[in-house]
Image (tube, helix red, strand yellow):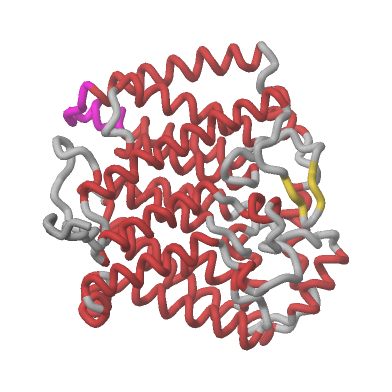
Amino acid sequence: MSYGAAAQPSRVLPVPSLATLAAAMTALAVLTLFLVSSKVLQWLGLPYATSGGSALAKFHPATFLAIAALLLAAAATGFGRFTARAAIERPGLVAFAFAILLLLFQAVIIQKLPLSAIVDTFMLPLALFLAICALSDRTGSRLALVLHAVFFANSAIGYLEYTTGFRLTPYYMGSEVITYDWRATALFGHPLSNALITGAYLLVLANGGGKRFDVRLMAFLLVFHLGALAAFGGRAATIVVLALLALRGGVASLGILAGRPVSRRAVITVAVVATLVATLGTLAVLGGFLDSFLDRFQDDHGSANTRIAMFHVFDGTSWHDMVFAPDLNHIAANQRRLDLAIAIESFIVAFFAYYGAVTMILFFAGLLAFCAEIIRVTGASAIMPIVYFFIVSSTSTGIANKTVDLGMLTAMLLLFLTPRFLPAARRQARPC
């Protein structure tokens, strides 16, 4: 045995910093949010949207990841410093946090409703806001590109499902698999969630989120995702998107007539998109591609009647209960009587029915403050997607039920519209 060779020192692997771990956890939370829908969780056998099972299974995995990312980001800065800075610089987040606490008290203590609905629907967006704002410019820009690819894949899968009848994600209604519905489920799970989020993405692209792309690619993406709305069967989403795009085009046209300077890129994009939409839309109608979608305007399977009947869920409810805390057993009995056992087709009416007027008004004030903070970070370009989101959501139970749609909107707006996450040549300095 030779003792002449000196022992080689062992290589010590670098330990990732807390900020690096927080960034990785934030990226994982965002991707999990968009790639793992509630329908996927149900397909995996987790009782996320059904009764029974572990209480932990009632929370979306992205919620756990977002909260972990937030804690890591806070630890990297220092919990006290992180909290104080957020409270001083983002007072709207403080208002939203207190609104969530009020809603939790009303739901869990007073109304005996599940905790998970409020955590996934509202705490997830709050955690994502703070975690995404803690990302570096480079990490946020890369994550935004990945998310653009996810949206493209989702719409492409939607086209495939619409034309072939294949379903990547089973469509569950309760515990029953629905096979008769032609609407695509794609990556985001429910057809209406697909339509809602894809429509918001379209408006993000049209309001500055597509600046990183070439004009031709930008025009293609707008037409491509607009056509996908038909595959998802989103009537309200399609109508509102077209109306808001027309409004934006009209305002821009008035500005041109008034002598306001306009970019060449904007003129080319509008001209190309308008031509492609008119041409491809005509071919799709004549070829029968949109028959299933257009049939939904003729036969809505009782949705319109449901939206009229839902106002009668308050029949027999006292004014005191309507203001402070409606009797949920009485509301449920009225739903069964009106054949509205699945849902109240408006999140505003549903909030009123579940929590009462006082809690609803105070919570909506906090939610408005949260949206104002998003606009402060991203600029006025976020206003139109936010308005769209709440208009379309008002046609369904939406955020009055357990959903991650608001979290998806929050992540999308911050990653696509925050100036410092855009390419360096086009961004403007604005701290998150």
Q: Is residue 246 visible?
A: yes
- Indicate the quadrant where residue 292 lies: top right
Where is residue 56 drawn, in percent x and y?
Answer: 61, 72
Where is residue 267 drawn, in percent x and y?
Answer: 28, 21
Query: What residue is shown at x 40% (from left), y 67% (from top)?
Result: 126
Relative side of 159 to 429, left or right:
right
Query: What residue is shown at x 37% (from left), y 31% (from top)?
Result: 250
Where is residue 54 drawn, in percent x and y?
Answer: 68, 72
- Indicate the quadrant where residue 401 lies: bottom right
- In-front residue for pair 116/40: 40
- In-front residue for pair 55/86: 55
- Position of residue 282 relative to residue 56, above or below, is above
Query: What residue is shown at x 44% (from left), y 40% (from top)?
Result: 201
Q: Is residue 260 magenta?
A: yes
Which residue extends farthest front?
1
Where is residue 432 drawn, in percent x and y?
Answer: 23, 59
Magenta range is 252-264
- In-front residue for pair 326/412: 412
Query: What residue is shown at x 61% (from left), y 38% (from top)?
Result: 186
- Position of residue 273 relative to residue 254, above or below, is above
Q: How many marks?
A: 0
- Position of residue 263 relative to residue 180, above or below, is above
Q: Is residue 97 magenta?
A: no
- Position of residue 428 relative to residue 103, above or below, is above
Q: Is residue 368 visible?
A: no
